[in-house]
Image (cartoon, grey):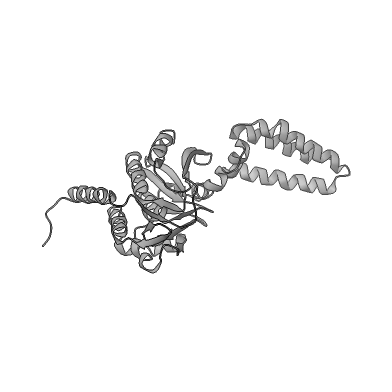
């Protein structure tokens, strides 16, 4: 018999069931055992996309939803009205993860796992799966395994937790088979690591690419977001995250080493280059300033005689 219940009502019922069942799971952990650092959120300005995006790293724990909401207010929205959330996490507490999801739903989020990021356990099957748009890029990896309850130093199978996670995933357009494909084969101390090809082609509905992935340069900028965000200086972050600045930086580097190889006074040339870095490039705080600095230095080097 076909149900006459409206889809929106079904979603509300399912969501209510998820939250009631979560009250039983406050000690359930879905993460790769042996990792303990807490989750940290930070704002990263991506110059190519001209977006302030949110980076989320570390173990998911109580209080993360509040931290997420506080910083999400400072992030920008893409052309689809979504805040980009870059994920790099081993997983964590299931109840805490679903509280973050509640916050994500209020904000409207584009979840992405870019180059050199790993999103495992509760990060993959709960946070990543709950984005309105979802992408795995470059060498990014998702890790799946079964949901287990920690009992002292051991882990006990928790089928209820797995069902709640599957219910949430299906609400987000992911097939039950897709989200559970690896769960029954991998225990608490095992992990099924999958990259973009498997995640986006074999796990139906798991990936849901956004407009940022349509063009090569914006897709590349998104793919490099985690690596670029880890650079210390503003100048390094800008150069790493912008295609034009990366090209001019490469051009200058090639010219400099060509001149250095042919120079009769290598000590002076090295000193001049350090002075340029210190007094010109490293005082810039935006793209326009960096481009001027680079072009002036390139002109100086090209006019220089060996």
The answer to which quarter of the image holds residue 203 is bottom left
Q: Residue at x 38, y 41 (%)?
A: 65
Residue 296: percent from the left, percent from the top?
Answer: 71, 34
Residue 64: percent from the left, percent from the top?
Answer: 41, 42
| Residue 186 in view (yes/no) | yes
In this rendering, would 150 be left or right of 140? Answer: left
In this rendering, would 116 be left or right of 146? Answer: right
Above or below for 65 versus 175: above
The answer to which quarter of the image holds residue 281 is top right
**Of 47 and 146, which appears nearest the observer?**
146
Above or below for 116 versus 67: below
Extreme residue in the front direction: 152
**Of 253 and 149, which appears nearest the observer?**
149
Extreme residue in the right direction: 264
Residue 34: percent from the left, percent from the top?
Answer: 49, 56
In this rendering, would 241 be left or right of 4? Answer: right
**Of 152 and 52, which appears nearest the observer?**
152
Looking at the image, how many numbered discs can be counted on the residues? 0
**Of 39 and 305, which appears nearest the observer?**
39
Quadrant holding the C terminus: top right
Above or below for 237 versus 181: above
Quadrant holding the N terminus: bottom left
Q: Residue at x 29, y 55 (%)?
A: 164
| Residue 79 in view (yes/no) | no
Residue 249: percent from the left, percent from the top?
Answer: 66, 43
């Amino acid at each position: 018999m076909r149900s006459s219940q409206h889809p929106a009502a079904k979603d509300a019922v399912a969501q209510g069931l998820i939250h009631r069942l979560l009250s039983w799971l406050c000690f359930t952990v879905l993460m790769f055992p042996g990792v303990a650092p807490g989750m940290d959120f930070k704002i990263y300005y991506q110059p190519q996309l001209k977006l302030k995006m949110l980076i989320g790293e570390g173990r998911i724990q109580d209080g993360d939803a509040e931290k997420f909401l506080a910083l999400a207010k400072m992030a920008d929205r893409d052309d689809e009205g979504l805040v980009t959330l870059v994920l790099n996490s081993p997983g964590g507490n299931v109840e805490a993860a679903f509280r973050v999801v509640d916050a994500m739903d209020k904000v409207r989020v584009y979840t992405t796992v870019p180059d050199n990021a790993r999103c495992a356990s509760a990060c993959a099957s709960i946070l990543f799966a709950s984005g309105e748009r979802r992408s795995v890029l470059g060498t990014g990896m998702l890790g799946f395994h079964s949901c287990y309850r920690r009992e002292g130093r051991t882990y006990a199978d928790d089928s209820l937790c797995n069902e709640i996670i599957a219910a949430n995933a299906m609400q987000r357009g992911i097939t039950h088979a897709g989200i559970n494909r690896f769960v029954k084969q991998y225990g608490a101390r095992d992990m099924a690591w999958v990259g973009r090809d498997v995640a986006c082609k074999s796990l139906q509905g798991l990936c849901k690419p956004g407009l940022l992935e349509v063009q090569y340069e914006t897709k590349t900028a998104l793919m490099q977001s985690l690596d670029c965000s880890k650079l210390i200086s503003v100048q390094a972050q800008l150069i790493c995250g912008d295609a034009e600045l990366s090209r001019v930086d490469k051009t200058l580097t090639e010219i400099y080493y060509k001149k250095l190889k042919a120079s009769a006074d290598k000590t002076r040339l090295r000193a001049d280059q350090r002075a340029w870095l210190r007094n010109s490039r490293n005082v810039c705080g935006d793209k326009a300033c960096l481009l001027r600095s680079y072009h002036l230095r390139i002109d100086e080097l090209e006019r220089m005689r060996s």
